Image: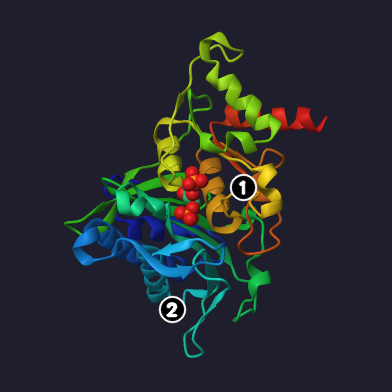
């Protein structure tokens, strides 16, 4: 499609690939884009509009919520509530499923989102992002319950993220490759800037939070050790390392110049309920879908992320994603450990 095409036009033209799609899908993506533009505006204004810092509340995972976490969640709900494109919504910032008001029209989609991922970075003016995953509501269900959201990532109709960085960018897949749109603030529109994104199968760059090294399982310890040995070790090449602590920024870097990202399970912390950090339904699944659509791979080490059967809405999962050959190597190490 032509570079500079608006997101709306792009979606309308793409909708024909989606079985049974009506204008509802276009409407839903437009709603999400509107919420993202509003969040982008606040992230951009920051201290000028008093949105930095923390609230007194904690989310269901016990994490202190930032003001912008709460505001972004409200903006997402506000953009979707009365438009008739979704049947319900689930978010990192809400304990349970958000049910639409009784008088709101129902749509056929379910939205899962992390309204502002990487929010520990907000106050230090480093990139953050919104992540979203779209599922179809089961036929005939107008008031979905939590179990209707518990579906493997392979069932996603679309997934995307919006990165609030030096540019605001919306990255989207509907299962036919990955496209990138950049927000033109003069027009107030997301315009297509890149299509058919491809992640190189090999890389010399990994991303992991090294401070948890003592909690890693053996396969992760061995993989990182191999990378660190560089040209003198079994990999016979040097690796560089990055850690932004903002998954959206890490995935965006990987889509742009390659790399592998790891947020493994911290087995020794498992008893304390810390088996990894990232949530399956609204962080790992949408990112895994995008990465696979760009020719990369996404695994827990033991299985393809998109095939994990969810048991609860805020479930956590180990995440290894990016360059296909690196993810394969990590999988191989897990398999040889399992014998
Ligand atoms: P959040 O949803 O509470 O912002 O947490 C998710 C973020 C990811 O974006 C990032 O990869 C990770 O947390 C960083 O975690 P850590 O601080 O352990 O390095
Ligand atoms: Mg998050």
Closer to us: 118 or 9: 118
Image spot of residue 78 (x, y percent): 38, 76
The residue furthest right is: 339
In the rendered view, tell whether residue 102 sits above or below residue 59: below
Image spot of residue 151 (x, y percent): 66, 61
Helix, strand or loop at disc 1?
A: loop
Q: Please report whichever mark, 2 or 1, sits nearer to the chain's N-terminal start.
A: 2
Q: Is mark 2 within 8 Å of ligand 2?
A: no
Regarding residue 37, the answer to whether it shows in the image is yes
Q: Which mark is residue 81?
A: 2
The nearer-to-camera label among 2 and 1 is: 1
Image spot of residue 61 (x, y percent): 56, 62
Q: Which residue is mark 1?
A: 276
Q: Which mark is residue 124?
A: none
Report which quarter residue 189 is drawn in: bottom left
Task: Specify whether 336 is left or right of 148.
Answer: right
Task: Specify whether 304 is left or right of 120.
Answer: right
Closer to us: 226 or 161: 226
Residue drawn at the location 32% of the way across and 62% of the way down: 39
Report which quarter residue 339 is drawn in: top right
Regarding residue 188, the answer to whether it shows in the image is no
In the rendered view, tell whether residue 44 sits above or below residue 78: above
């Amino acid at each position: 499609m032509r570079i500079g095409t608006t997101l709306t036009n792009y979606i309308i033209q793409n909708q024909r690939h989606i079985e049974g799609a009506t204008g509802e899908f276009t409407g839903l993506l437009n709603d999400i884009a509107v919420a993202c533009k509003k969040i982008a505006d606040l992230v951009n204004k920051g201290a000028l509009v008093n949105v930095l810092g923390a609230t007194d509340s904690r989310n269901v995972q016990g994490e202190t919520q930032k003001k912008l976490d709460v505001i972004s969640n409200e903006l997402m709900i506000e953009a979707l509530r009365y438009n008739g494109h979704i049947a319900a919504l689930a978010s990192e910032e809400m304990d349970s499923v958000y049910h639409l008001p009784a008088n709101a029209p129902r749509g056929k989609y379910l939205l899962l989102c992390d309204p502002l991922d990487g929010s520990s970075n907000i106050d230090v003016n480093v990139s953050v992002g919104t992540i979203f995953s779209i599922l179809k509501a089961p036929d005939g269900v107008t008031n979905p319950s939590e179990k209707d959201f518990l579906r493997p990532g392979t069932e996603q109709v679309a997934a995307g993220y919006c990165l609030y960085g030096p540019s605001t960018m919306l990255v989207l897949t509907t299962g036919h490759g990955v496209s990138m749109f950049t927000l033109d603030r003069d027009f107030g529109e997301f315009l297509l800037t890149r299509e058919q994104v491809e992640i190189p199968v090999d890389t010399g760059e990994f991303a992991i939070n090294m401070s948890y090294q003592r909690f890693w399982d053996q396969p992760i310890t061995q993989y990182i050790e191999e990378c660190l040995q560089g040209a003198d070790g079994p990999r016979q090449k040097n690796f560089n390392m990055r850690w932004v602590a903002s998954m959206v920024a890490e995935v965006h870097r990987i889509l742009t110049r390659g790399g592998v990202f790891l947020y493994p399970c911290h087995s020794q912390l498992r008893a304390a309920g810390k088996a990894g950090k990232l949530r399956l339904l609204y962080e790992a699944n949408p990112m895994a879908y995008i990465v696979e659509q760009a020719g990369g791979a996404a695994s827990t080490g033991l299985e393809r992320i998109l095939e994990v059967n969810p048991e609860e809405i805020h479930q956590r999962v180990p995440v290894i994603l990016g360059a296909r050959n690196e993810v394969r190597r990590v999988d191989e190490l897990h398999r040889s450990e399992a014998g």
